[in-house]
Amino acid sequence: MVSKNQIKLITSLQQKKYRKEHKMFLAEGRKVIQELLQSNFELESLFATSAIFPEINPNKINLVTDAELKKISALATANDCLAVFKIPNQKEKSDSGLIVALDDIRDPGNLGTIIRLCDWFGIKDLICSEETVDIYNPKVVQATMGSIARVNVSYLNLENYIKETKLPVFGTFMDGKNIYKTELPKEGIIVMGNEANGISATIEKLAQNRLSIPRFGDLQQTESLNVATATSIILSEFKRNF
């Protein structure tokens, strides 16, 4: 049974201001919840249509009907379980190694996929501009498929961060150097830009190294790659020789 107060709280967590106020976020589906349970994230409560996750304290489990779960789900088609987790304090970011920085990424699916890519390629730190979509947006959490537990994501003033770093900064541009013919280092910051506008003019001035992914299509008419797709290609090239 889900109480009216629980419904009100859970549905409010679909909005950033209430996630910030309550310091909690939603996760849906067995895989995502299992990954978070095995990490340092602290479970607040679980709502499920059957008895699953026997390792959870019974006091935190609420058995609900499909109809009740649908009421509190942020998804168009509800899973069989939904969990509320506490938002942890932001960890210290690293100043070494290979780091991905996002300049105003707005699509939750893109951010979630990029977090998964960072996890896959061993990128421990992801830096997000303050305008980038919230990592605890339910659609972002869903798209990470659990990788949110293994990548350290920091939100900060991207311009100041890049100005202060001692690492080389790589920007992705249509007119940059061919990434397949460029010698790439083990360490650096890779900046990926907004879906519609690319890297902002302010950040572009700070990117000493301009990279591009060349088009091979005969017609050469495709304007750009999806930012998550571009990130996968670029990370693959940076990691290929190491």
Image: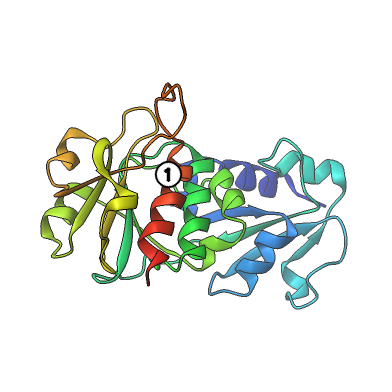
Please tell me which residue is depicted at 61% across the width and 47% down the height of the picture: 9
The one of 30 and 115 positioned closer to us in this rendering:
115
List the single residue furthest toward the front: 218
The residue depicted at 49 percent of the width and 57 percent of the height is: 117
What kind of element bears circle 1? Answer: helix
Q: Residue at x 44, y 50 (%)?
A: 233
Q: In the picture provided, is 104 more to the left or to the right than 216? A: left
Front one among 141 and 233: 233
Q: Nearer the viewer, residue 216 or 195?
A: 216
Colour scheme of the rendered structure? rainbow
Asked whether 135 or 114 is in front, the reply is 114
User: Residue 92, how many percent across, how many down?
Assistant: 30, 71
Tell me if residue 123 comes above or below residue 208 in the rendering.
below
Label 1: which residue?
A: 230
* Residue at figure coordinates x 75%, y 49% from the top left: 3
In this rendering, position of residue 97 left or right of residue 21: left
Q: Position of residue 190 (x, y in %)?
A: 29, 54
Drawn side of residue 69 relative to residue 163, left or right = right
Three-letter residue code for mark 1: Ala
The percent coordinates of residue 145 (x first, y second) are 62, 57
